[in-house]
Amino acid sequence: MRQRSANKRKKKPQILSPDEFQKLHDELHEPYRTRVIVAMCTGMRVSEVLALRWDHINFKAGVMLVQQGVVNGRIGFVKTGASNDYIPLDPAFAQISSIGKGTGRMGLPSLPPSLVAATTRA
């Protein structure tokens, strides 16, 4: 007997046009704007974006390491072994995101400072 995966997609992901993405970006406030930018520019899962740390991003080499995810409020390993990998950074995205390095969020203070898309809730 073959068991169905509980994690199987129920519907096809919606792909936003550049205009739709811009409209969404303009409507969002931090920390959601940063999270959406990272997800849209990298294809990372929401759980991976929430666990992304500045020390996982190598701006000089132009890559970021995806190795953690947030599940039930806790940071742990990524969903699949295949997800534990380096993602190349688009040079324009790398330039924008490097501006926020050290502030914990792209241009805004946050807690904890090591997380890229941290929330201000403790």
Image: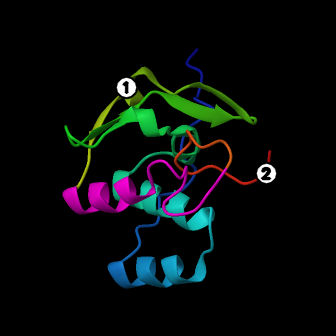
**Which stretch did the figure color magenta?**
91-110
Q: Is residue 82 above or below residue 119?
A: above
Q: Is residue 82 left or right of residue 115?
A: left
99 or 5: nearer the eye?
99
Image x and y of residue 56, in percent: 40, 33
111 or 71: nearer the eye?
111
Disc 1 on helix, strand or loop? helix
The mark found on residue 121 in the picture is 2
Residue found farthest to the top: 1
For disc 2, the neighbor class at 10 Å (few under 14, some 14 to 19, many from 20) is: few
Q: Is residue 33 above or below residue 45?
A: below
Residue 61 quadrant: top left
Image x and y of residue 74, in percent: 71, 30
Q: Residue at x 63, y 73 (%)?
A: 29
Q: Which three-letter amino acid code belongs to the residue tagged 1?
A: Ala
Q: Is residue 35 left or right of residue 61?
A: right
Q: Is residue 58 left or right of residue 112?
A: left
Image x and y of residue 111, in percent: 68, 46
Disc 2 on helix, strand or loop? loop
Q: Is residue 107 above or below residue 105?
A: below
Residue named by callout 1: 82
Quadrant showing the C terminus: top right
Q: Residue at x 45, y 27 (%)?
A: 67
Image x and y of residue 12, in percent: 47, 58
Quadrant showing the N terminus: top right
Give yes or no for residue 1 being in the magenta stretch.
no
Q: Is residue 46 above or below residue 109?
A: above
Give yes or no for residue 95 being in the magenta stretch.
yes
